[in-house]
Image (cartoon, rainbow, N blue to C red):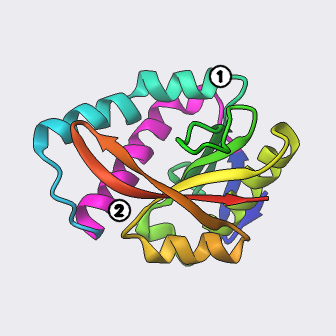
Amino acid sequence: MVHDNLTIRRAGPADAAALSALKLAAFRETFLDGFAIPYPPADLARFEVESYGEATVAAELAAPDHASWVAVEGDGRLVAYAHAGPCKLPHPQASAAQGELYQLYALKAAQGRGVGRALMDAALNWLAQTFPGPQWLGVWSGNSQAQAVYAKRGFEKVGDYGFKVGDWTDAEFIYRRG
């Protein structure tokens, strides 16, 4: 699918290195540069390796119950992504038999071009076909813009939890639709 000179496609094993770099860059751009969360350096370093290291991303891409999509510029550079799979959220009504949108990020240079909407559509459609029942996601409590986007898509806040970044804990909201 092509959208605003960006190609949206399912990511595969050959994307592991580039997707790992994109995930790290998007996380840093969003939470360090954008929201200026003061993560302790050791916690941040551990989290980045565990969550966005190439081995982690390669394992996600190889997992049959996970799926990732990427937005690719004409020059081949990845600028946005979505990642989904079985629900891992700590909510009494959630289960691994239901689906979760784990991540949806676009670099600032790609924002405002409809790429987030296209990636969300791909992920939510895949979740609906792959996992019966409700769809879930977690969102940082301070990200009101993302919360508004999810609410427009029919998600409602149904809980909260602590998301670990090393030993640091971010306050997160749990959202569900369906």
Q: Is residue 13 magenta?
A: yes
| Disc assigned to residue 30 | 2
Q: Tell me which residue sits at (54%, 21%) in the image.
A: 59
Q: Nearer the viewer, residue 95 or 23?
A: 95
- Rounded to the nearest angstrom, the CA distance separating label 2 from label 1 is 26 Å
Write the residue at 30% across / 37% down. 48
Q: Are marks 2 and 1 in contact (CB under 8 Å)?
A: no
Which residue type carries mark 2? Thr
How many other residues sit within 10 Å of disc 1, few (<14), some (14-19) or many (≥20)? few
What is the secondary structure assignment of the residue under circle 1?
Answer: loop
**The quadrant where residue 74 appears:** bottom right
Which of the marked residues, 2 or 1, is nearer the chain's N terminus?
A: 2
Q: Is residue 113 visible?
A: no
Horizontally, residue 45 falls left or right of residue 104, namely left
Residue 166: x percent and y percent? 24, 36
Residue 89 shows in the view: yes
Q: Pointer 1: what residue? A: 63
